[in-house]
Amino acid sequence: MFKISRSVNYRNFGFIPRGNFVRDLYGKLFGYPNLSKRLTAREIMRALDLKPQQTVLDFGCGYRGYFTVEIAKKAKLAVGLDINKLVNEIKVPDSLKDKLQYVVIDSTDVPFEDNTFDVILASEVIAVVPDPGVFLKEWRRLLKPGGRLVMINGTGRDSIRRCYDRQAIRMKALKFLFKKRWPSEFDEYIKAINIQFGNEKSVFYDVNSMDEMIARNQFERSSCRYMSTGYGGELLEWQQFIRYLRGKKVLAKNWFVPTYWIFSFLKMIGRNTNATAILYVAKNKKNSH
């Protein structure tokens, strides 16, 4: 009943009809409810710089593949790949049958030939894998000569870490209110919420570490910038922290719509000092011979 838009639409970004009227109506109106990614979607899509003749791999697309469907609207072919078997249940819209596909893997080996892709998107991947070098080697194999790798990696909730380290007044007040749930160290909190996100490991690489990593694997940096969600990003970090202290899940989707619009406004007027993620673009240095 509900059809996806032919072009990228940031109002309902990531909408894929699922055959459920209520859920599809919500998706058609508001898109996929991932707050942090929705707030930075424009920046990520600009970094991908997609062209109609390109083949693109969304490595670690998630069980809903919501970013991949938007990529397919601008590329020749978009492939969403993940270890989550629920990816097999994604219903590819009829209008994108020849441009969009989803693949489930159970190892680091990807079932595509060398030099298949023009662009690879790897969002929050290298932070959660035991050896990023294994994945970078595979991405280099899959990319065409001169192909681009776009990586997004979180910076680790710096606004909270700064207050935690200097024992700011607000931290002392929260510690008094939530003694039973108070983490003895900041990294204890990070580990706990990453478990909620399904990550057994999480490393917040800085730019120098990423430079060294990609150089070892015959990539070179094309561009790098910090993404910020301004006051909205800071508010989201504190909202998640307080939810954790209250013993609730840090990712709350119940109030996505009003929260998204409020945070979008706060991003426009807020400062850009609180970097929430690194947007890193690297070029494959291998030649065509």
Image (tube, rainbow, N blue to C red):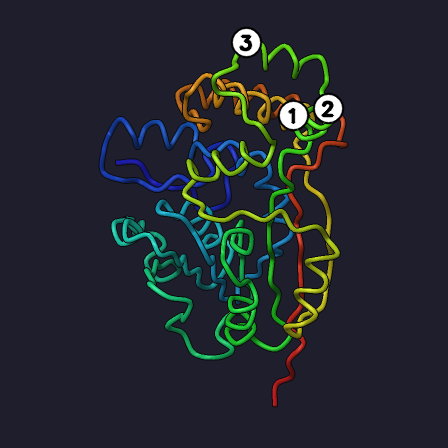
Kindly identify which numbered label has been placed on residue 270: 2
- Identity of the residue drawn at 23% across and 33% down: 20
Q: CA distance from mark 1 to mark 3?
A: 21 Å
Depth check, mark 1 against mark 3: the one in front is: 3
The answer to whether mark 3 and mark 2 are in CB contact below 8 A is: no
**Callout 1, which amino acid?**
Glu
**Callout 2, which amino acid?**
Gly
The N terminus lies in quadrant: top left
First in sequence: mark 1 vs mark 2? 1
Q: Secondary structure at mark 2?
A: loop
Residue 287 lies, with reference to residue 99, above or below; the image says: below
Depth check, mark 1 against mark 2: the one in front is: 1
Q: Would you call the spot at circle 2 few (<14 residues within 10 Å), some (14-19), or many (20 or more)?
A: some
Q: Secondary structure at mark 1?
A: helix
Q: CA distance from mark 3 to mark 2?
A: 29 Å
Q: Would you call the spot at circle 3 few (<14 residues within 10 Å), some (14-19), or many (20 or more)?
A: few
